[in-house]
Amino acid sequence: MRFTFDGRPMTGEPGDTLAAALLRNGVRVVGRSVDLGRPRGIFTAGPEEPNALVRVGADPMLAATTVELHDGLEAHSLRGKGRVDLDAVDERRCDKGYLHCDVLVVGGGPAGLAATLAAGRSGARVILVDDQPRLGGDLLNSRLLLDGAPALDWVAGLDLPARVLTRTTAVGYYDHNYVVAVERRARGERLWHIRARRVVLATGAHERSLAFPGNDRPGVMLAASARAYANRYGVRAGRRAVVFACADSGYEAARDLVAAGVDVLAVVDPRPSGLPADVEVLAGQVVTGTTADEEGVLTGVQVGVRHFDADLLAVAGGWNPAVHLFSQSGGRTRFDEELAAFVPGTSAQAERSAGACRGLYATREAIADGYAAGAEAAGRTVPDLRVPECDERISRRPAALWLVERAPGSEPAFADLHRDVAVADLAMATATGMRSVEHVKRYTTAGTGADQGKTSGAVVVGVMSALLGAAPGQVGTTTFRPPYTPVSFATLAGRDRGALSDPVRTTALHDAHVALGAVFEDVGQWKRPRYFPRDGEDMEAAVRRECHAARTAVAAMDASTLGKIDIRGADAGEFLDRVYTNMYSTLAVGACRYGVMCGADGMVFDDGTTTRLADDHYLTTTTTGNAAPVLDWLEEWRQTEWPDLDVSLVSVTDHWATVAVVGPRAREVIAVVAPEAVELAFMRYASVPVLGVAGRVFRISFSGELAYEVNVPWRYGRALWEAVLELGVVPYGTETMHVLRAEKGFAIVGQETDGTVTPQDLGMGWIVSKRKPDFVGRRSHSRPDTARPDRKRLVGLLADDPEALVEEGAQLTAAGVAPMLGHVTSSYHSAALDRTFSLALARNVTPGDRLTAVSGDMRQPVTVVEPVFYDPDNTRRDGDPLPEARVAYRGDCRAESPAAAFADRFEAVSTPRVRLREVPFVSMWEVRGTDPGTGLRLGPDWWLVSGDVPPRPGWVDVSGQRTVLELAGPAAYDVLITGCPIDLDPSVFPGHAQTLLARTSVILERLPPETYRIYVRSSFAKYLAEWLIDALEAS
Amino acid sequence: MLLIDCPHCGPRDENEFHYGGQAGIACPTGDVTDEQWAAYVFMRDNPKGWFHERWFHVHGCRTWFTVERHTVTHEIRKP
Amino acid sequence: MTHPDFLWRNPEPRPAYDVVIVGGGGHGLATAYYLAKNHGLTNVAVLERGWLAGGNMARNTTIIRSNYLWDESAAIYEHSLKLWEGLSDELDYDLQFSQRGVLNLAHNLSDVREGRRRVNANRLNGVDAEWLDADEVKKFCPIINVSDRARYPVMGATLQRRGGIAKHDHVAWALARQADACGVDLIQGCEVTGFELTGNRVTAVETSRGRIAAGKVALAAAGHTSVLAERAGIRLPLQSHPLQALVSELLEPVLDCVVMSNAVHVYVSQAHKGELVMGAGIDAYNSYGQRGGVHVIEAQMAAALELFPVFSRVRVLRTWAGIVDVSPDASPIIGPTPVDGLYVNAGWGTGGFKATPGAGWVYADTLAHDRPHPLAQPYALDRFTTGALIDEHGAAAVAH
């Protein structure tokens, strides 16, 4: 395998890590240290690497010890910091996945394998994750024999009854046994979210170093890592080695290095006695320093007065159980004097550590512990599990040695290699008065490096205990925080990128808007046309034309995004009386009324019109952005405050497509598309055929002109829109809507209001009922500050210069300096007024007052006026009479399903393993209250009935509310788990559920064996279609 | 990601729900002082320990329900 | 960076102090410092349950700005920013205060309107502020993606050039060092477990290290304020929530300003050492657990990559959570409480760090004179009764 390092061509072997390959090519210096610029080499063989940090392609910084070599890899050395290459293109596609299990085992070493075997054989659903390409854990690095054969034979012989994820690092352990793991794939990582009943942590242990002078030279390496390079990769990390063995694992390393052909000069053991070995053992001694060549690379090891010419110093400082995930789970660690290490103490979640991560380092012990942990997690013992025989020696107690005193003038002794923190720095910190390890960490930056303290944490604690004369257990550790290993932003974002970064909502008319060249604006998740430019018009010209059409002829807008709530029940009127400031129980059937609702704090929360469809049946509209919050708010009051009221709420926002037909000649359009509604009076509603299909027409005006809101079921929306436009009606967008409503002084929630504005402030005292005993927020209106007479009020403004537009957001002052009296909320050019005008909130002003509007560097003189600029006497709302009889629309009303445009792409992306399609239209009803005996139960008293059934009274037609997409085939499950967090396993999934898919609300229904139907709100259908296509392409 | 046990749908991930704060706060009726009204609108317990709180299964069955949860460990206990 | 050789003593608590400050975070230490410096009050103890500045002071994203909408907010945050501008010299400690500019991005027309409104209010209040259109944003911060094809395009931004970042630990240590030098006792590992009341007046605190008599007691415990207040029999309109943040691994310089986007919950700057420091949204539920959900981080990263595609392969090194005490109007509560001699400074939510010197200043003044400092007056507890809120949520609703 060919690769380059800093442009130098090199070759490696399959299975190499980049670090192994660099060693294979004799590279000693891999980078420089972050502060001091000291040369640094490869220190470890795993994710705990503090030194060998490299940039690879678009990856600003990776540990060379974790990079799997591939042909053509280009690596660049770093100076302790990553480098973002602004030109790098990252074509990887990350993904996510959601899994559930009875037992999650983290770590595929001896303990984890044993736990998996025990739990799986007992019948539990088990997932095993391991960060290496192959299972085996430390067995991969060793020459141990199990039952007389190479240990990996034992591993290969295991038939693991589990879902096994290799190259997968568990990085976070969150509340309620939620473990997040990163699977490394060449095409981009996958972030797994695993909810487990029980977790077995078998995360092993990290070898540690200790602080001695010159311990950062390239050539100083952890002993187990040197052994791993020799055994696993067949690479000698040096030719002549000294082993510093504070623990007996150093002797094993020495043996294996010798076997690999390394000339081991000595084993230095600080304990009083050494072990018998084939090389010289210096017991009761320590490494006191190192020497280096002019490049800083290790040339020798000093042991007191003795000097060894060595290019490798293998340090076995002892072991630290990898308690990171345990600690993240909320468990508390304790210091074990025998092991001289922190080990798991009390568990906080349904979790247990097994093997080396709780200090059981010996292979047989770890396997036995793994069996026990697996059985315990599964809740059943499996009888026939045998611990294999092993040729491992029993380890003695390690030396609790953290630092070697430094002679004056010698090299620094480093505690944190990545952050260049030496013992002297730690001493300086404690001398300032700092006693907490957290303070010292922050003062020195020790433990905050790329290895996240894996090689430095224990050394810092040890050195501090020496400096402060306290036991390590008293010093304590800093908190282990997720992630266990660094995780790229892209991994965490998954497929939530670009167009899929947030769900998009579109109306039934969207494709027609696109075809017309609309310019869209984002309103919440909705895409709404802002204006429809023609022939190179800018916005101002387009809006002037659109306004002109609405004021003098007829224009139309897509109003489908307004929230629509079907409210039914004997107490529906009473319910509305309580949530709106005005009365609805007295509203005549067939009449519409505008209303405002407040929060408990009395501030305006939302507004809209409500229509009484029948005695016990209302339809309420909400603002676009507040549709969901309003429905949730109403549901909260219904369930938690007034459960005795007979009322039910059903969203029909997506069931209807709504076209507002506006202008003095609107009647001519209605006469064609909905002739039976042509005589409709102002603020009245009729349920009439529209283009021959059952529709609803409301005579509601948000512009002061004659206007109708024409509703048809979603699938006919586009036909209605196109039929209207064919009549010569001018399409308009939200910008024109704003101008028209502002000319009439109509406030917009969220524009004229900001959560600090009462209905009275808006000049709508008339809408606040004095007759009702109470409504939500009423009491707040009489608080001292809310009842103040000098609160800001909605006013109109006219600039002295009729051409000058006062910017929205301009502040109002008496003379151009503070204090501020208010601000400009809306400001437009008006075709009807032939000038600019503004709405504002301001205190202590009355019409005729002169103010200065301040925006940026502009100071504009303005005059306060009443906030109604156009037709204050409402003379225009009845429009022009029909000039002549019109012929009703006779064409077909073409139905178009929400995902119709995706049919070809669904076909193209489908494979024999997974097929994607839109299910043809079926009628659907939501049923509240009594069990209809059919359909999908959605809630305690809530059902969705679909298909060819006769609807019963009280059923709410929601046929257009949802679109049904279908995934079928053996891989359908694999696609769904990339975006659906619930447990879809057939043994658990009840057949249908309301849940989230791709961050949208769906009903998911499984048709056995492997077909899934996804009922999604029609406005999300296009987004979800794109998401599913993307998922299929990524799978 | 907490796992919240919905009384209708069973255990679901936290992001299917909206948090509703302290449970058992009734809207006062009749004449109340400004102080009593302020207490209803703004004052909520904020204990360090067990807490009765409301959740709304907004992306599921749309049921409001009460959960007892520990505000340090996040453990949820059944009544 | 060189630090002073000595920071603080580790004294045993004395039996009595004129003022006992509960909470050794940034606000508590700043209060102690200004009590000593501005008012000559040095018979003061700061009682810290854990280690000094180990709560939100150690966990925040260190953003400093004063570009708040309302007059009352602008006044106190600008007072604070002016103090920041002289603080390194005054405390004789390099606080790495860097006025590199803070961008608050606008992603829709409502954001644009509210951003302009805030800029204009700021300027009239003497707070530096500018409105940048998308091209100017790109010029100021070239790595931001301002493509109009983005899911939520950048439509402009407010810029406060005097805003920036500082090194939070240094701020705490510098304040602690000066307070200690003035004779203030900084007592760590000392948890307040109760209050001794005589009549309606607080006379002592009970602690894990014994009873300590106090002339006045000043709460400065951020997320734990409710718990303490309850021990004194007071109910406050505060809710404690986890607020998560994270750092990346060290990077060569790549981002030289602070970028904030309320709409998509991204707050990012690059610290002096090179790590990207990022804040996320608040977790929904009440918690004292200093831990949040990973989904909050995932959403934050997705949003961050929309703004900064170049960070795609940058890696998160460490995530954590603080406990923020959130008030109903997202503004603090400063001043006396219904218990005589007991004062509160809380409810700073996500805004506490930037207010550190300003809050310490006005709180110390309030304590010294037994009346609210003029800048603190609007932040009295009774505003929730009168309705005179200082609502900094802004126009949260998007509606047409």
Image (tube, coloured by chain):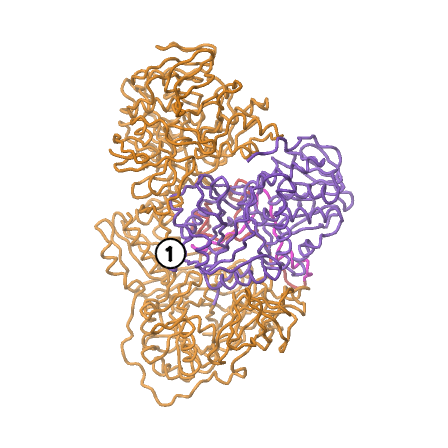
Chain colours: A orange, B red, C purple
Q: Residue A448 location, x and y as percent?
A: 48, 35
Q: Subunit of mark 1?
A: A
Q: Which segment is the magenta one?
A: B32-60
Residue reaching furthest left?
A912
Total of numbered circles in the picture?
1
Along the horizontal axis of the image, is A806 left or right of C74?
left
**Can residue B44 be found in the magenta stretch?**
yes
Q: Nearer the viewer, residue A544 or B1?
A: A544
Residue A997 appears anywhere in the view: no
The quadrant the N terminus of chain C occupies is top right
Task: Give the image quarter of residue A376.
Answer: top left
Q: Residue A856 location, x and y as percent?
A: 54, 64
Please give the residue where the numbered disc 1 appears in the rendered image.
A1002
Around disc 1, counting alpha carbons within 10 Å, would you say few (fewer than 14), some (14 to 19), or many (20 or more)?
many
Above or below — where is A297 with respect to C324?
A: above
Q: Nearer the viewer, residue C118 or C392?
A: C118
Q: Residue C258 location, x and y as percent?
A: 50, 50
Above or below — where is A703 with respect to A387?
A: below
Q: Residue A427 location, x and y as percent?
A: 57, 26
**Can residue B16 be found in the magenta stretch?**
no
Above or below — where is A149 with respect to C221?
A: above
Q: Amino acid at mark 1?
A: Val
Q: Residue at x 23, y 60 (%)?
A: A904
Which secondary structure, mark 1? Answer: strand
Along the horizontal axis of the image, is C313 left or right of B49?
left
Q: Residue at x 44, y 21 (%)?
A: A318
Residue C290 appears anywhere in the view: yes
Residue reaching furthest right?
C199
